[in-house]
Amino acid sequence: MTRDSKTRPAVAVTGIGIVTPLGLGVADNWAALCAGRSGIRRITRFPTDHLRTTIAGTVELPNEDLSRAASSQRVTRYATLAAEEALATAGLPVGRFPGPLMLGMPPVETEWATRFALARRAAGATPTYPVLVDAAEGWQEMYRKAAFAGPGETLAEHFGTRGAPIATSTACATGATAIQLGVEAIRRGEAEAVLAIGADGTVEPESLIRFSLLSALSTRNDDPAKAARPFEKTRDGFVMSEGAACLVLESLEHAKARGAKVLGYVRGCGEKSDSFHRTRSNPNGEAVIAAMRNAIVDAGLTPDAIHYVNAHGTGTPENDKMETLGMRAVFGDAAPPISSNKSMIGHTLSAAGAIEAAFSLLAIRDGVLPPTINHEEPDPAIALDVVPNRARDAKVVNVLSNSFGFGGQNVCLVLSGEPA
């Protein structure tokens, strides 16, 4: 049977690649996650004097120094590493991918180092906007760093994907959006395979300062490994992080025809935006609840068929209460276990939805629920089983993976061990 319960092509996952502060590759990341190890550390990439937050989850690559790279360059590098691993797992060659690229990535802008260089190129003139535009004329390197579609074009050329690459950004739901776009393309019959990637590399001064000004970041600098504490009473914000994950998506028919090993299925996708505020979600939780329900219905399931929820779980006071509200509305008093990978890897922003989808598939594969670490003082307002501190063996067939973005951009995915 190669179609789902709604007679659409079933969407199989045949390749997974992961890059996070915990390490490079699926094996190292999954082992660290199940062991409850934190990848949060002090920032050494740039000076942190006078900053309220001085910790983050940074990716350290062996024999590579990306500390001076633009965030778009880090996005490209992390995405490349994740996709190469996913393609190797899927048994597909680099350079001849049989479908399109869906890339979830952060917005791109000219960073401070480039702005200062532009001011120098202006030769002492007052650095007004028109003067800086004139100074940028002919500077191709700056354009390549700051063009939003640049990483997608580079990746598409490297991996030989078909058609125009799609680059998208939906705040913290971005990685899940890239997967959803791939699923929809396969279901519509527009593609037999899709390279779906979520990547982020924006641990840099300006992003850190902006999130700090929103009072969104943890300031628990003294003990970085203990800073990210989703669902816990003393939580004080999220920890910025970076990384990438790639899923090779194929119609089940295409995967079977080439003899590929199926690692799981993307069985359902749900999205809902509330347009309530630039950063906050509507306090009534309507969009969060609808996204969760939509994903479960799209999967042809009922809430009692969900065995585990991979939380958005950022560790901000508001988000965790909102996710709890959604869990109660969708599952009632019989909510399944829910845990947050962000307690260990931090919030990888545009990459989070893809990384957490990958971890959800590994939970299904091994029958293991990764823990929510740093759960020292339970919050009485969050009456959920958050798999505190230690991984747990469990029967896992269907996982709901939540991604709730700034501005009420919400995408939920149902990952499954069964096509329908």
Image: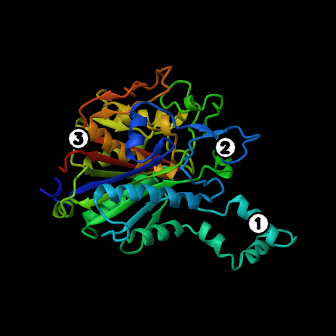
* Secondary element type, mark 1: helix
- Secondary structure at badge 2 equals loop
Q: Is residue 420 left or right of residue 288?
A: left
CA gap, disc 1 and disc 2: 23 Å
Query: Circle 3 sits on which residue?
Result: 302
Closer to the observer: label 2 or label 3? 2
> Which residue sits at x=25%, y=57%?
11
Q: x and y percent of residue 22 in the render?
A: 48, 41
Which residue lies most toward the left here? Answer: 1
Q: Amino acid at mark 2?
A: Thr
- Residue 372 at what x, y percent from top left? 44, 30
Q: N-terminal of the two: label 1 or label 2?
A: 2
| Label placed on residue 366 | none
What's the distance in space between the residues labelled 3 and 1, CA to CA? 56 Å
Q: Is residue 330 visible?
A: no
- Residue 415 lies, in percent from the top left, at 29, 46
Q: Are marks 2 and 3 in contact (CB under 8 Å)?
A: no
Q: Amino acid at mark 1?
A: Ala
Q: Nearer the viewer, residue 210 or 318?
A: 210
Q: Is residue 375 left or right of residue 204?
A: left
Residue 80 showing in the rendered view: yes
Q: What number of labels is visible?
A: 3
Identify which residue, 166 or 406, lies in the foreground: 166
Looking at the picture, how far across and down is residue 410, in whole percent? 43, 49
Instruction: Name the residue type under label 3.
Output: Thr
The reply to whether discs 1 and 2 touch (Cβ–Cβ < 8 Å) is: no
Residue sitting at x 86%, y 69%: 126
Q: At x 65% / y 32%, what residue is drawn?
A: 221
Residue identified by numbered label 1: 117
**Sequence order check, earlier mark of 2 and 3:** 2
Residue picked out by circle 2:
44
In space, the residues marked 2 and 3 are separated at their CA atoms by 47 Å
